[in-house]
Amino acid sequence: MNNIFTLSKKGLLLVTLFVTMLSFANENLTFSVDVVGAKTTFTLNSVQEGSALSIKDIHGTVLYSEMIKVTGRYSRAFDLTFLTNGKYRFEVEKDLEIREIPFSITSGNAIFNKEKEKTVYKPFIRVAGDFLYITKLAVDGEPLEIDIYYTSKAGNDQKLILSEIASNEIKIERAYKLDGLNFGTYKVVLRSSDRIFEKSI
């Protein structure tokens, strides 16, 4: 497998990445949280239908999740008093980004720290012909671990054919030629920001 980039393909990929990222960056996810007694009201002022809302603990275990079925304003009241003392986070996931809104529970009270909120940009995987393109916005300089596995149609053995770590880049861009697409399948496993993203080809 060869890691290749011709200037024309790199330019086209760069333009596509910028247009995609700018369209998502312009959609500001503004929200508010009101805590009154045992009730925490979480409001998203501008959200897309199909976005996923979840509450996770510090280990990433999902405690609550739902698909948002409205576009525009979304509001929901939660009773978080059942949570034990510790650190948690709301996550709003859409297309290529995940917004993390951390909070802690102390003696049944939810405490939000706006300074610790962050946006995680998901990698974008695209296949065109026998080329695999991977792009990711890494504004915090977080590395992207890339593993590509191949399984032939003849056997069930999955073989690691490429492993690399892309780092020190604000915009991570990679292109790979997938030889043997007619004779087997590929699995792409990407790791970044303590998350795993997978795609089978």
Image: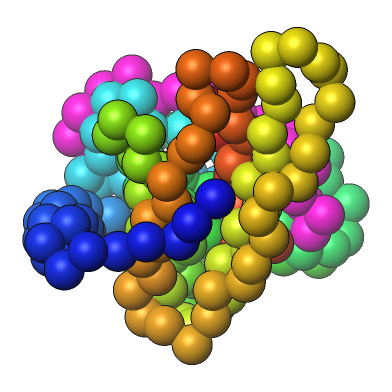
Camera-side residue: 48 or 81? Answer: 48
The image shows a total of numbered marks equal to: 0
- Using the image, determine if residue 182 lies above or below residue 103: above
**Membership of 68 in magenta stretch:** yes
Q: Which residues are magenta?
A: 57-74
Q: Residue at x 39, y 70 (%)?
A: 172
Coordinates of residue 139 in the picture (x, y in percent): 39, 78
Coordinates of residue 180 in the picture (x, y in percent): 53, 28
Camera-side residue: 48 or 159? Answer: 159
Residue 95 occupies quadrant: top left
- Using the image, determine if residue 150 lies above or below residue 156: below
Q: Residue at x 28, y 55 (%)?
A: 29
Q: How is the image coloured?
A: rainbow
Residue 195 appearing in the image: no
Q: Which residue in the rendered view is the most extreme toward the top?
A: 154
Q: Using residue 95 as the reference point, say whether residue 9 is left or right of it.
A: left
Q: Using residue 23 as the reference point, say whether residue 73 is left or right of it.
A: right
Q: Residue at x 26, y 39 (%)?
A: 47
Coordinates of residue 109 in the picture (x, y in percent): 72, 59
Residue 173 appearing in the image: yes
Coordinates of residue 103 in the picture (x, y in percent): 64, 63
- Using the image, determine if residue 107 lies above or below residue 117: above
Q: Which residue in the rendered view is the most extreme toward the right?
A: 84
Camera-side residue: 85 or 10? Answer: 10
Q: Residue at x 76, y 46 (%)?
A: 160
**Membership of 102 in magenta stretch:** no
